[in-house]
Amino acid sequence: MSTSLNNVHNGCESDVLPEVLLIDDEAGILKVLSALIADMGYCVLPAQSAEEALNLLSAQAIPVVITDIRMPGMDGVQLLRQIKKQWPDTEVIMSTGHADMGLAIESLRLGATDFLTKPINPDLLEFALRRSVERVVLRETVRRYTENLEKMVEQRTRELLQAERLAAMGETVAGMAHAIKNIAGGLEGALFVLEKGLELNKREYLEQGWGMVKRDVTRVRDLTMNMLQLSRPMEIRPEPIDPDQPVREVAELLASRIREAGGTLMHASAPQPEAMLDPEAIHACIMNLATNAVEAVEEAIQAGRIDHGDGRVILHTECNGGQVCYVVEDNGRGLSDEVFASIDDGMFTTKARGTGFGLMATRKAAREMGGELVLENGIQGGVRATLRLPLKPK
C-alpha cells in the first residue's frame, strides 16, 4: 500500500502527518479522542464500528488505525486480523481496559504496533502515534529506495550486457578480420607462385601454387561453414546409429592427409550399442577436432618438434554411464598452461594459423546437443579433446 503523507479529507488538511482512523463504539470517547488527536496535527476519520472502519479502509488508504478492543459485533482483535490480512502495512494501535491485557498482548502477536490502556494518557497516545508514523515513513522510504535500486540495477545490467555484447562482437569481428587476412595472404602467395610458374613455364611452381590455392579455398569454406553454424541455432535430428560411425567416416577422410604429412591416424574403438544421435552434427564436430589435431601434428613435424613418421592422431569412441565420449588426441604442438587457462574466454584456437571459429562452433554444437567439449593435455604434450554427449537426446 502506497500512502501519501499530504492528504486532504473531510475538510481537514495535514501538511506532514497522515490520517488516523479512530474506532470506538462509545460516542463520547470517540468525540474526545478525535479532538485530542486533531490537536496533535492529525486528520481524524471517526468510526463507531468495525464494519464502518472496514468500509472506510476499502474506500481509501489510511496508514494508522486506533481501535477499541471491546466492541459489539466484530471486536478489535477480529478487526485487527482483517486489517492485517487485507492491508498488512497499516499500523494498528489497540485501545484496551486493564481487564483486557491478555487480549492486548495477543494483539501484539497478531501484528499490532502498540496498545494503550484506558483512560488514555495523551502523552502515551502522542508517542504511540509518532512511532506508528515513523514506521509508515520508514517503510515508504525503504520501498522507494528498493524501487530506485532495482531500476539502477536493471539499468546497469542492461549497460553491462550491451558492453559485453559489443566486446564479444569486437572480438568476433577481429577474429574474422584476422582469419580473412591470413587466407588473403595465403592466396597472394599462391598467386605469386602461379605467376612465376607461368612466367618461367615451370610445372612444379604451377603445381605448388595450385596446391596453395586449394588449401586456402578449403580454409574459406571451413570458415564460412563455422560462421554459419555459430550464427543460428542448430536443428538436432537424432536417429538410431552406431555411435562410432561418424568417427570412422572422419578417419577415412583424413587418413591419407596425415600419412602424407608423415604421421599416423589411429582409430580403434570397440563395438558400441546403438544410440539416438545426430550423425551429421557429430560428424561436423569430430571433423573440426580431428582436422585441428592433424594440422597440429603437421606443424610439429615441420617445426622439427617431432620426427617425420612419429606424429600421431588417435580417435576413440566409448559409451558409458548414459554418455558417449568421443576422444580426439594428438602429440602435436600442444598448448601452454596460460592458454589452457584462457580456453573459455572468447575465440580460441589450437593452431598457429587458426581462427578459433571451429572450436567455437564445436562447443556450441556440443551444448545444443546437451553435452560438453573438454580440452586437456594430450600425449607427449599434445592436446586431448573430449566431446561428451548423452546417448539419448534430452
Image: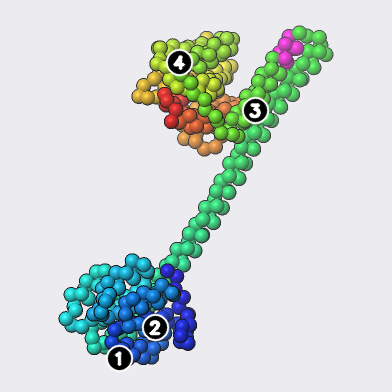
> How many angstroms separate mark 4 from mark 2 (CA)?
81 Å
Q: Which residues are magenta?
A: 204-210
> How many angstroms separate mark 1 from mark 3 (CA)?
90 Å
- What residue did someone put label 1 on? 28
Q: Determine the secondary structure under disc 3.
A: helix
Q: Are marks 3 and 2 in contact (CB under 8 Å)?
A: no
The way the protein has been coloured in the rendering is rainbow
Which percent across, then down, holds residue 354? 59, 27
> How many angstroms separate mark 3 from mark 4 (CA)?
29 Å
* Labels 3 and 4: the sequence-earlier one: 3
Label disc, if present, on residue 45 of the rendered structure: 2
Q: Determine the secondary structure under disc 2.
A: strand
Which percent across, then down, holds residue 190? 73, 19
Disc 2 crowd, CA 10 A, few/some/many (<14, 14-19, 20+) = some
- Compared across the picture, whether 329 is left or right of 64 comes to right
Disc 1 crowd, CA 10 A, few/some/many (<14, 14-19, 20+) = few
Q: Which marked residue is nearer to the observer: mark 1 or mark 3? A: 1
Which percent across, then down, holds residue 31? 34, 90
Q: Name which residue lies at 72% across and 23% down.
A: 187
